[in-house]
Image: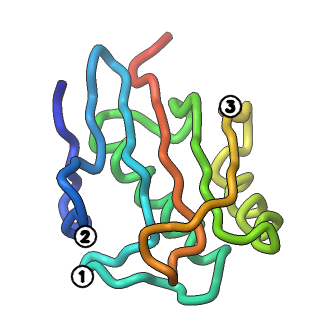
Amino acid sequence: MTPINPEGFPPPIAPYSAGTMADGVVYVAGILPFAADGNVVCLGDAAGQARHVLESIKAVVEAAGGTMADITFNHVFLTDWANYAAINAVYASYFPGDKPARYCVKVELVKPDCLVEIASVAHVGRG
């Protein structure tokens, strides 16, 4: 296993890496909408938070040598179904071709200002 911690990522709020790679598979931790200083970005804006989270996931996957097209599965957590459409609109723009498998559940997140969290699995270097 190789840890993946892109430069400029916020300090972890628990003992984990932003991602890990094992046998060509990248596991991206649950990414929250945190700025490099650890503060929540885009307060009250589910679309803005989703964009920030997906850009962070992209940074982890690219640091491992992959692209967003290598993502095969996403775990989406949101705090309010009222934000589902806004999050999906941003999400769809990051996966314009074949869509990865995913699930989406309503949860309470670690920080009350966070509206979305996404964890991903990518297969880097597959044919």
Provide the residue designation for mark 1. 37
Q: Is mark 3 on a helix, strand or loop?
A: strand
Residue nearest the observer in this picture, 75 or 72: 75
Q: What is the x, y in percent for residue 28?
A: 38, 42
Q: Callout 2: helix, strand or loop?
A: loop
Locate residue 125, reporting x and y percent.
39, 19
What colour scheme has been applied to the protein in the rendered image? rainbow
Looking at the image, the residue that sits furthest to the bottom is 43
Q: Which amino acid does label 3 sit on?
A: Ala
Query: Along the polypeptide, which appears first: circle 3 or circle 2?
Result: 2
Q: Mark 3 points at which residue?
A: 101
| Marks 1 and 2 close (CB-CB < 8 Å) | yes
Left or right: where does residue 11 sit relative to residue 46? left
Type of amino acid at the residue the image marks with label 1: Asp
Q: Mark 2 points at which residue?
A: 10
**Mark 1 burial class by Cα count in 10 Å: few <14, some 14-19, many 20+:** few
